[in-house]
Image (cartoon, grey):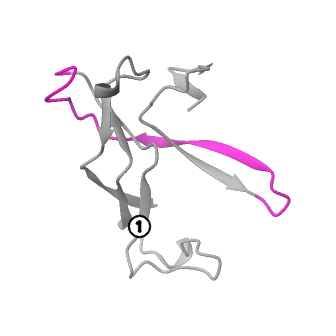
Amino acid sequence: SYGHFEGDQFLTDDFMPYTNQVTTIHCDSHRNYKQYLMENEYPVILSETVNRGKPMFFGAGAYFIFREDVPMLVNDVVDFDSLQKGKTLIGHIVGGIQSTLPNLTCPGDSCASRYIFNVYVNKK
């Protein structure tokens, strides 16, 4: 990501570092884009191989797969009003890159992710 937060400060990095922050990108009918920082991040998983003990970064190139039973609107948006209150599993993030450093120093610092992450919506 070109931009990321460290505490309350928004920082940019021309090297596009890996980060575990999760954003949503909205594109309107005029192709205007806005990016929103979500509350949650990928979980902390420590590397057991390269750069042992360092937290890994996830997300780049990953896919989101909806559960088949999630109520959807016509335009492939979750029908939030149809969800029950509380925490609902809506899908999974699979694939993508996992990296042991924000900016790579050698090709061995990253590889294909073997993890599957559950994605929940918490309706209050």
Residue 102 coordinates in the image, percent (x, y): 42, 23
Q: Quadrant of residue 65?
A: bottom left
The amino acid on which the numbered mark 1 sits, given as a three-letter code, is: Ile
Q: Nearer the viewer, residue 64 or 69?
A: 64
What are the residue bounds of the magenta stretch? 28-53
Furthest-left residue in view?
Answer: 48
Q: In the visual, does 56 lie left or right of 47?
A: right
> Measured along the vertical axis of the image, is residue 8 above or below residue 40?
above
Q: Nearer the viewer, residue 4 or 71?
A: 4
Q: Which residue is mark 1?
A: 65
Residue 121 coordinates in the image, percent (x, y): 43, 61
Residue at (45, 30) in percent of width and height? 18
Q: Specify the principal SS of the magenta part.
A: loop
Q: Secondary structure at mark 1?
A: strand
Furthest-right residue in view?
Answer: 30
> Measured along the vertical axis of the image, is residue 67 above or below residue 27?
below
Residue at (45, 42) in percent of width and height? 60
Residue 22 coordinates in the image, percent (x, y): 48, 42
> Measured along the vertical axis of the image, is residue 35 above or below residue 28?
above
Q: Quadrant of residue 56?
A: top left
Residue 51 coordinates in the image, percent (x, y): 22, 20
Residue at (39, 80) in percent of width and height? 68
